[in-house]
Image (cartoon, grey):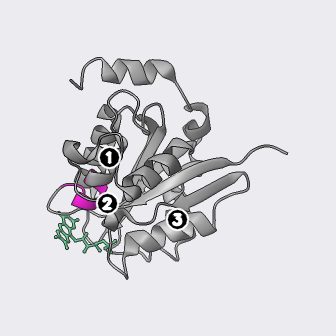
Amino acid sequence: MTTPTRIVALVGSLRSDSLNRRIAEALRDQAPEGVVVEIAEGLGSLPFYNEDLDGEAVPTAAATLRELVGNADAVLAVTPEYNGTMPAVLNNAIDWLSRPYGVGALVGKPFGVVGATPTPYGGKWAHADAARSAGIAGAIVVDGAVHSQSALEVDVLEDVEVLQRLQPSSRRSWPSSRLLPEGRSGRRSTHGR
Ligand SMILES: Cc1cc2nc3c(=O)[nH]c(=O)nc-3n(C[C@H](O)[C@H](O)[C@H](O)COP(=O)(O)O)c2cc1C
C-alpha cells in the first residue's frame, strides 16, 4: 500500500459561512484516492507574528501549525481576496511558517493557492500575492496550482468541473513537482535577508 499524499489546507477566511472554507471542505471530502486533505484549524488563534514571541518557546498555535505543515507533503491555500490582497489571517500563517529563517515549515513544500470571490476576477490578486509570499518563504509554487474562480455565475460547490479545477491533485504537475531542491534555492537566493 502506498502512503497517501498529505496536503494541508490553509483557509484565508474565518467567517462561519465562508465559501472558501466550504471549498476546502469539499476538496477534503472529495479528495481522490491516495490524497488526504487536512484543514489547518485555529489560524484565527495565531497571534500576529512577532519575533519577540518566536524564541525557544513559541505560542502553542504556532507550534501546532508548524508541525502540521512540516509533516505534510504539500500546502494549499484556499482563500478569498481582501482589499486586493490576501486576508491577514493567511498572511500571518505564512509569516509563522516562514521562520526560523531558511528552515521554516514551508521550505521545499509544493504550494498551491485557489479560491473564489463574488467578482469577475475570483480573487486573483490575493492568489498571486499568496503564491509570491509563500515562494519567498521557501515553498515551491506548483505550475498550474493557482486558480482564481469567480463565484458570480456558477455554484462553485455544486459544479463538478469547477470543483475539479480547484482540486490541486487534479493537476498533473503537482506530484512530479514535489521536493525540487533547485526551485527552493533559486528563489531563496534572490530574497530573504
Ligand atoms: C474586508 C473585505 C475586503 C474585500 N475585498 C475584496 C477584494 O479586494 N476583492 C474581491 O474579490 N472580494 C473582496 N471582498 C469580498 C469577498 O471576496 C467575499 O466577501 C467573499 O465571499 C469572502 O470569502 P468567504 O466567503 O470565504 O468568507 C472583500 C470582503 C471583505 C470582508
Q: Secondary structure at mark 1?
A: helix
Question: Residue 127: x, y in percent?
Answer: 31, 51
Image quadrant holding the C terminus, namely: top left
Q: Based on the displayed image, in which of its 4 quarters is residue 102 positioned?
A: top left
Q: Which mark is residue 46?
A: 2
Q: Residue at x 28, y 38 (%)?
A: 132
Look at the picture and state if 120 lies above or below 54. Answer: below
Look at the picture and state if 175 lies above or below 91. Answer: above
The amino acid sitting under disc 3 is Leu
Disc 1 marks which residue?
96
Mark sitting earlier along the chain (1/2): 2
Q: Is mark 2 within 8 Å of ligand 1?
A: no
Image quadrant holding the N terminus, namely: top right
The part of the chain drawn in magenta is 85-91
Q: Is residue 121 visible?
A: no
Q: Residue furthest front?
A: 56
Mark sitting earlier along the chain (2/3): 2
Disc 3 marks which residue?
163
The amino acid sitting under disc 1 is Trp
Question: Residue 140: x, y in percent?
Answer: 43, 33
